[in-house]
């Protein structure tokens, strides 16, 4: 076989190609480590400048730091950009951030380039050699899959990245491994298929059957790891995922030759080290023998006893006194209470600071374990006896926010469990004089006033502690209440569609909160008192008011005053109805900043996506990465997504959707069964409808048409697509709602 015919002249060995792959993979980790070290050096430089009372310590002040800031801004803007997917069926489906697409695309390109390097794909005698190399490249990726899966892994420590931010790399590297494994099997089948030898080969060759079995197990792992499937029952997913990977590695260990088994032993060692380290931390933190406790505590084996208190809006306050470890604001732990929820542990964000000498968690009741915790708290009578709990953690990393000139904290509902400790820590550090930050803008979006009570005390203390200080930290806090019936007026109408649609002109078909009260106000307004208009003559932003009746300005002011009094909040905490205009709010803080700004957000997927998009857009408008002199923006997204299954009752022009017979699944939580639910259209990413639905008969085109055009379509039959999406919302253009002036406004099915 001549080199010219086979195209295999001077082929490198598979071990050499594996080394090339790991040079690139290790190089990426080294670059991320260098960036992490650079961030730490900048952090120390800024704090040192602040301690010397230098002006604008968060602003680059020498050429080297300016170059670093420009490169950082360019990287952030590129990695955080979100590309809209032009898929007609799902018009609002967004692809992952561009940074993730580029990283995974580079990994796939590198793998395929190595796998097919110097091979002639059309030459049949090369096919088995290609299959062997693809199999070797599959094994080469296995250590990286396990390296990114551990909760206490060395990559996270080196790069300053939390395990949950590495987990998506774990999933995508496994998918890339599936691609090369499929090439490995496919080229063998292609070679055997020329002689119709595949059935005979599988029947007679045990190694081939082992390889097919390993591929099938890997296929199951990939399919079961998809978000819609793994969120159905997360605890079951975790158990079967571990069992599946044990089965996969066992089959692979038997399948591969002896000289390649090292690629299987390395990931096994990585997994065992992670489990051993986690177990040692768990034992040390939870066994009282390792800690100096009080006399009554020394007699018990487990260190922690937790009390459970019911909070408004089906939330539970879990409190643990005298923790044995330190943590940083924004971190979380895995909490396990065997007497209430046996054999389960779930991640919850710590809402207190180490200086409080206690751990507290605010947990919203869903289905399963969180509902059991709430039921126990609701049924417990004082004095409450503590329940034995186990704490695994802490986990999570975020750049220290005290190094930024301005910090914007945005939370939705229970997302305040993440942003409130960050606010309190900045206030505490400001009192100690160890902070660069001049201003903190705290924004909290809640559904009703009951949720405000979760952190009313902490918010009041944070605001009051900096009030009246000259030259110190400024805290500006706003709470936006989106759907509380106290802001609606019962006008006595029946809650049917006809009476509602004729009640006003702002909302055509409002969603009902219950009874004959409509969903509160859909305000999109920045703080009115700040004057966010771009010109002196521009009119204020109008709000889409509730059609069931709107209280007068005096009445609304009285309601807000009563909320301040009820929750003991200072008047400086702005309480507003509706939702904030995040772009105007963030832009105002960027224009007033005297250095780099940090934006941290925690909340539903819709809120997270809006903040990411607005921050990226503002950075592009300000040309931060182009040396315009504008200060950079650091964005940290700590979000959670929700999948809702149910029967759609109604959808209005803003895509506000009402459903019945609902199963709601929050990421990493048990599903919750609800009779009905109302979802704001701005938080919906996409709809998935069954393919069996006869959309031709269900969707009705109610857009006005010229009479002659309607007559012509009636005579000629017209084109009948399978969904809305034409230029005026008519039929055609795939199965999705959306398009120019059609109903749905671009967000659709």
Image (cartoon, grey):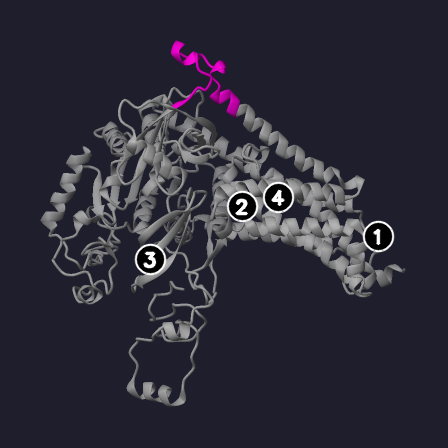
Q: Is 38 situated left or right of 486 in this image?
A: right
Give the magenta-colored segment's residue range.
Answer: 282-305
Earlier-in-chain disc, 4 versus 2: 2
Callout in the foreground (1, 2): 2
Callout in the foreground (1, 3): 3
Marks 4 and 2 sit apart, C-alpha to C-alpha, by 19 Å
- In the picture shown, does residue 558 fall above or below 737? above
In the displayed orientation, state which residue is furthest to the top: 295
Earlier-in-chain disc, 3 versus 4: 4
Q: Residues within 10 Å of mark 2 (few under 14, many from 20)?
A: some
Marks 1 and 3 sit apart, C-alpha to C-alpha, by 64 Å
The image's mark for residue 659 is 3
Earlier-in-chain disc, 1 versus 3: 1
Marks 3 and 4 sit apart, C-alpha to C-alpha, by 36 Å
Residue named by callout 1: 10
Q: Residues within 10 Å of mark 1 (few under 14, many from 20)?
A: few
From the viewer's side, name the closer residue of 335 and 561: 335
- Camera sees residue 405: no
Marks 3 and 2 sit apart, C-alpha to C-alpha, by 31 Å
Q: Is 499 situated left or right of 187 in this image?
A: left
- Camera sees residue 677: yes
Residue named by callout 4: 244
Marks 1 and 2 sit apart, C-alpha to C-alpha, by 37 Å
Residue named by callout 2: 168
- In the picture shown, does residue 91 fall above or below 394? below
- In the picture shown, does residue 436 fall above or below 104? above
Marks 1 and 4 sit apart, C-alpha to C-alpha, by 39 Å
Q: Hey, which quadrant is residue 724 in on the image? A: bottom left
In the displayed orientation, state which residue is furthest to the left: 554
User: Does the magenta-highlighted stretch encompass residue 285?
Assistant: yes
């Amino acid at each position: 076989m001549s080199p010219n015919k086979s195209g295999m002249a001077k082929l490198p060995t598979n071990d050499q190609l594996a080394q090339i792959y790991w040079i690139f993979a290790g190089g990426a980790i080294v670059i991320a480590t260098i960036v992490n070290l650079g961030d730490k050096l900048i952090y120390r430089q800024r704090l040192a400048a602040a301690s010397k009372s230098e002006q604008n310590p968060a602003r680059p002040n020498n050429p080297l730091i300016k170059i670093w800031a420009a490169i950082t801004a360019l990287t952030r803007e590129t990695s955080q950009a979100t590309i809209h997917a032009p898929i007609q069926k799902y018009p609002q489906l967004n692809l992952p951030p561009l940074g993730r697409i580029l990283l995974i695309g580079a990994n796939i390109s590198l793998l395929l380039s190595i796998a097919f390097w110097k091979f002639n794909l059309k030459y049949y005698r090369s096919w088995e050699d290609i299959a062997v190399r693809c199999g070797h490249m599959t094994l080469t990726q296995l250590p990286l899959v396990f390296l990114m899966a551990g909760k206490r892994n060395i990559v996270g420590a080196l790069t300053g990245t939390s395990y949950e931010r590495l987990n998506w790399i774990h999933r995508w590297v496994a998918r890339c491994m599936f691609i090369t494994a499929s090439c490995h099997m496919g080229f063998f089948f292609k070679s055997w298929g020329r002689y119709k030898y595949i059935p005979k080969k599988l029947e007679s060759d045990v190694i081939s059957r082992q390889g097919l079995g390993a591929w099938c197990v890997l296929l199951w792992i990939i399919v079961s790891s998809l978000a819609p499937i793994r969120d159905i029952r997360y605890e079951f997913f975790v158990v079967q995922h571990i069992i599946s990977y044990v089965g996969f590695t066992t089959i692979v260990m038997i399948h591969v030759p002896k000289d390649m088994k090292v690629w299987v032993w390395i990931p096994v060692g990585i997994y065992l080290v992670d489990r051993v380290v986690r177990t040692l931390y768990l034992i040390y933190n939870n066994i009282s023998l390792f800690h100096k406790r009080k006399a009554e505590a020394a007699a018990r084996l487990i260190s922690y006893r937790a009390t459970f208190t019911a909070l408004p809006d089906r939330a539970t306050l879990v409190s643990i006194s005298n923790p044995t470890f330190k943590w940083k604001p924004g971190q979380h732990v895995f909490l396990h209470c065997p007497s209430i929820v046996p054999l389960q542990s779930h991640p919850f964000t710590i809402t207190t600071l180490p200086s409080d000498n206690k751990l507290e968690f605010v947990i919203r009741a869903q289905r399963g374990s969180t509902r059991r915790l709430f039921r126990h708290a609701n049924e417990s009578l004082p004095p409450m006896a503590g329940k034995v709990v186990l704490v695994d953690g802490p986990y999570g990393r975020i750049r220290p926010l005290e190094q930024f000139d301005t910090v914007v904290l945005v939370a939705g509902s229970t997302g305040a469990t993440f942003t409130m400790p960050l606010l309190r820590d900045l206030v505490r550090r400001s009192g100690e004089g160890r902070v660069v930050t001049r201003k903190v803008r705290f924004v909290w979006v809640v559904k009703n006033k009951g949720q405000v009570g979760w952190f009313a005390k902490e918010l009041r203390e944070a605001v009051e502690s900096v009030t009246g200080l000259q030259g110190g930290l400024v805290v500006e806090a706003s709470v936006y209440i989106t759907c509380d019936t106290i802001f609606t007026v019962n006008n006595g109408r029946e809650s049917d569609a006809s009476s509602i649609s004729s009640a006003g002109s702002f909302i055509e078909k409002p969603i009902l909160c219950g009874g004959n009260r409509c969903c509160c106000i859909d305000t999109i307004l920045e703080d009115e008192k700040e004057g966010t208009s771009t010109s002196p003559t521009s009119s204020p932003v109008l709000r889409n008011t509730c059609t069931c009746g709107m209280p007068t300005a005096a009445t609304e002011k009285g309601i807000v005053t009563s909320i301040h009094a009820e929750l003991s909040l200072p008047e400086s905490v702005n309480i507003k109805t509706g939702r904030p205009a995040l772009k105007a709010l963030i832009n105002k803080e960027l224009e007033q900043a005297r250095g780099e700004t940090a934006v941290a957000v925690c909340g539903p997927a819709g809120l997270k996506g809006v903040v990411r998009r607005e921050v990226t857009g503002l950075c592009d408008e300000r040309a931060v990465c182009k040396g315009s002199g504008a200060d950079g923006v650091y964005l940290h997204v700590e979000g959670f997504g929700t999948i809702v299954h149910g029967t759609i009752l109604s959808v209005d022009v803003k895509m506000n959707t009402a459903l019945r017979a609902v199963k709601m699944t929050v990421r990493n939580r048990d599903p919750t069964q609800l009779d009905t639910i109302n979802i704001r259209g701005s938080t919906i990413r996409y709809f998935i409808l069954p393919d069996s639905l006869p959309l031709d008969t269900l969707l009705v085109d109610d857009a006005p048409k010229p009479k002659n055009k309607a007559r012509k379509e009636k005579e000629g039959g017209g084109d009948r697509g399978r969904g809305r999406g034409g230029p005026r919302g008519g039929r055609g253009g795939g199965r999705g709602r959306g398009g120019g002036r059609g109903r749905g406004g671009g967000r659709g099915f």
